[in-house]
Amino acid sequence: MPLRRFLPDNFTLCLIATVITASLLPCRGSVAHVFDGLTDLAIALLFFLHGAKLSREAVVSGLTNWRLHLTVLASTFVLFPILGMLLKPVLVPLVTPSLYVGILFLCTLPSTVQSSIAFTSIARGNVSAAVCSASASSLLGIVITPLLTGLVLQAHGAGAMSWRSVGEIVLQLFVPFVLGQVAQRWIGGWVQRHRPLVGLVDQGSILLVVYTAFSAAVLQGLWKQLPLSVLGGLLVINAVLLACILLITRYGSRALGFDHEDEITIVFCGSKKSLASGVPMANVLFPAHAIGMIVLPLMLFHQMQLMTCAVLARRYAQRAGVNKRKAASTAAEIAAAD
């Protein structure tokens, strides 16, 4: 297997470069206020475009497979937080309290859309169901994630989430999303034809949030609070969390009687966490100086899930190809016998 398959993608390299830039040249004072304003505008534009490009027809067409969608949503918003809480005795000694809050926040986030659908397609799963499940998760997460984050943090004494934060999420993320859905009839076609431009806004807004977040965290002494041993512990935690969720979704979907294509959809939609939604939400939900530490687990998990799922999708595809060849060979033998 070529080494390049395990190398970070261009966006991950940009994230790393942004963190390095924020560490060496953090924005402060009036410049930080300007970046904060730009960040708010970029996030609103991001969710407006998400609303404009999300096809309502694609969502409605997949709604009939409700058992699959409920399974994916349960994995995303129930199983993940339960794992994060149950593993607390193991996780807390490995990381700082702020990083553990980041892990709990990671567990409450919605699934990705683009990569979930892409990996399901590569693995030859149920793509139409993946479109519906991933889209529903992303939409519901705007409301569920802040509420769930508040409940999880309060249950474990890490602080409560205020209703004001929920209101800010609705105002900054959900309202632009709804406006994008309303405007879809006029600009939906344009958005679909200019996907690269939308992708630049998507990635650019995340990089902007990461820069402002890590600038504030660096000024608060982020790297003095994060020795290499703690960073190594965080990598182990992400790997354990991802392994657990992949195994549970794979064998759980089989135990529930789903067919092979639906199993693939559940595995790839139910195991993802969205960086595109998580970073803007953290920017609203948490204090500026804490965001860098909060989103660090998500940034590492993002790259880890992409690398792992890329390998897993190819294995699913290879197995599907072998089964298809065996079926064709058997059919040929039957035809020859007849």
Image (cartoon, rainbow, N blue to C red):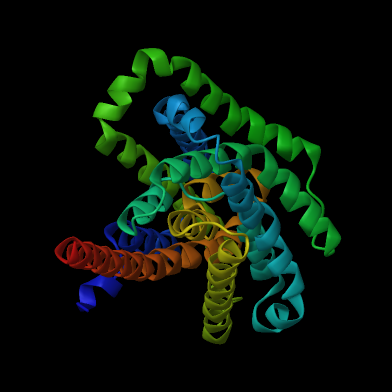
Horizontal side of residue 135 vs 314, given as left or right: right
Residue at figure coordinates x 59%, y 73% from the top left: 244
Percent across and percent down for residue 224 are: 57, 77
Percent across and percent down for residue 230 are: 58, 82
Residue at figure coordinates x 50%, y 61% from the top left: 267
Farthest bottom residue in view: 229
**Measured along the vertical axis of the image, is residue 254 above or below residue 224?**
above
Q: Is residue 74 or residue 32 the one in the foreground?
A: 74
Residue at figure coordinates x 65%, y 31% from the top left: 170
Farthest left residue in view: 336
Q: Is residue 175 or residue 318 the one in the foreground?
A: 318
Percent across and percent down for residue 154 are: 83, 57
Residue at figure coordinates x 42%, y 25% from the top left: 52
Q: Is residue 33 or residue 165 the one in the foreground?
A: 165
Q: How many marks do you count on the picture? A: 0
**Measured along the vertical axis of the image, is residue 198 above or below residue 95?**
above
Q: Is residue 224 or residue 75 the one in the foreground?
A: 75
Q: Does the rendering let one see residue 30?
A: no
Q: Does the rendering let one see residue 23?
A: yes
Quadrant containing the N terminus is bottom left
Horizontal side of residue 296 vs 184, given as left or right: right
Quadrant containing the C terminus is bottom left
